Image: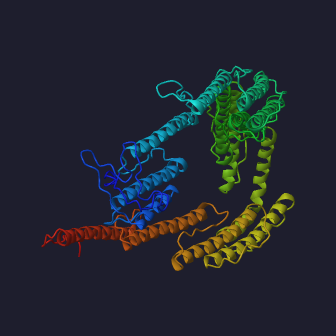
Amino acid sequence: MAPGCGSARRRVRSGAPSAHGGSTPARRGAALSTKQGRSATEVAAPAGEGPVPAVDVPSPELARVRDALRRLALGDFSTRLPEGSGPLDEVAEAFNSVARLQSGLQGELLRMAKQVGRQGQLDERVTLVDANGSWRTTVDALNELVDDLVRPTRELSGVISAVATGDLSPRMRLHGPRSYRGEFLALARSANAMVEGLAALSSEVSRVAHEVGVEGKLGVQAVVKGAGGTWLDLTKNVNLLAGNLTTRLRNIAQVTTAVANGDLSQKVTVDARGEVAELADTINRMVDQLSAFADEVTRVAREVGTDGRLGGQAQVPGVSGTWKDLTESVNSMAGNLTDHVRNIAQVTTAVATGDLSQKITVDARGEVAELKDTINTMVEQLRSFADEVTRVATEVGTDGRLGGQAQVVGVAGTWKDLTESVNSMAANLTAQVRNIAQVTTAVANGDLTQEITVTAKGEVATLASTINTMVEQLRSFADEVTRVATEVGTDGRLGGQAQVVGVSGTWKDLTESVNSMAGNLTAQVRNIAQVTTAVATGDLSQKITVDVKGEVLELKDTINTMVDQLSAFADEVTRVARDVGNEGRLGGQAHVAGVSGTWKDLTDNVNSMAGNLTNQVRNIAQVTTAVATGDLSQKITVDARGEVAELKNTINTMVDQLRSFAAEVTRVAREVGTEGRLGGQAHVEGVA
């Protein structure tokens, strides 16, 4: 209470107005009795002091006090009395103290209503400065009320928060020194009942989920005693879920078991939605794909293994993962078998057609590898036999080296008999041909007196007789033939003709043939000379046009082809030279179709020259560009010779010197400009 509130009340004059109105004549001057027997105009003094003497108070002062008390009673806590030196100064101080306390309490109550009641700041409490006595008691009572209201709220919040995080063990305390009563007790019991119901539901749901989802015991149902409302609905929904899951999984298990047993006729037919429906569709698709896979594998196995139709492949659309791997494995098996059989067939067919250059090259294992080795060994022996027979035939029949014998190591059976037959044929042929050669050699040497005397049969005997007759007839026109041959073949006088008087029959035909040959040869050689002379002078526009046959036709075609290739070669070389040498387009290559031998070598050499030049110039450009951009780490590494090698060494030396120069300049700049070490000098060896 404000100072002055404990001062003694003063007696007022009888004419002063009362607290409830103005003075009355009846009361004026009357003394009101009190329980203590004192006059109403006396004010009790503090202990140890005498009565406070009466003070005359003007009526306006009392009216202000009265009005202020009325406003305060009506709830206007902002009312204040002016404090001064008047007779009611202490009364004004006491009134203002009461009004301030009341106003402060009102403000605290409004703050608590906002912060605690609306904003939920449950730690806020009433605070009233200078509150003593009943004011302090009131403040404490209000704070105790807030504590009692906050405690169940916080405890309920803790339980609900635990439930929200999945902890169903907390409960609101129903017993204890500060146990709840009334509606708080009912709230606590309801909250605990809710948590216990949730715990029971959770336990049952967990049990069902564990038995169904972990232990695989289908058909389990949740039983929550006393559940009602939403909890009963939740229980029913869980049981519905477990029942539907049981039905669907059993149907899925039935189908997958059938698949495992090789029965691909069943499918998942149970009604399902969402991911279970997707699983059902997936399993049904799997069954379809397995069925298609089995059909395709059976088809390929029948085509390849039974019908002998190689190249068959399983086509299973839409498969992936293991099924795709299995399909690819089956196809790989069929493909490998196809490759093996086709390679074997290719080699044996080649052997049957006389081509002994091929071997079985396909990768194989096991019995197929043994078959591969056997056939390859057979081909090797056949090739060795063929090579020997060919060698003997070439030596005897082509090279004229008689007396040759076939040597085939390791052969037996039919191959040995064939070898001996070939050697016998070669020996007989050697004796006969040597005698024929002796006579024909004599004829070739101008000796027409010898005859063939070796014993011969068949066509060889006919040949011997024919040659002997030929020798006789040759003597009659040898001079003319020699003359024409000398003129045409030796003297180069084209157009000569043989004149043999009195010949007829074959010799006349021979004479005419010689003359025809000489005439044709004259025309052909002159045309060939014309074209080759044009080629020699750089004219590639002419070709041989004379009508020819046989080897001369081949010579004509060869020369004409040579002219075409030379023309194409010249065009390509000119183009590459222009691209690389004039226009600087590196990488150009000459493309001359169909050339071989020297022309192919020349084309390859031109392309090699252009390629080497391209690599060298590009490598030089790369290094010089790097130097221009400040990169001194690169060098010319391309292989080069001659002047290009000298240029390569010069540029690499330049790069080394530039790098050394840059390093020295950097070192001197750092020592002088950064570290402050004056007097540094750059040392670059070999520069000039």
- Judging depth in this view, the residue of 216 and 619 nearest the camera is 216
Classify 313 as above or below 98. above
Give the x, y percent position of residue 309.
82, 35
Above or below: residue 505 compared with residue 236: below
Q: Quadrant of residue 344?
A: top right
Location of residue 4 by image quarter:
bottom left
Regarding residue 411, the answer to whether it shows in the image is no
Taking the image as shown, residue 553 lies to the left or right of residue 659, namely right
Residue 641 is drawn in which quadrant? bottom left
Residue 73 appears in view: yes
In this image, 92 relative to 298: left or right? left
- Residue lying furthest right in this view? 505
Name the one closer to the observer, 420 or 628: 628
Instruction: Tell me: 673 left or right of 201.
Output: left
Query: Does residue 441 appear to the left or right of 298 in the view shown?
Result: left
Vertically, is 17 above or below 195?
Answer: below
Where is the C terminus found, in terms of image quarters?
A: bottom left
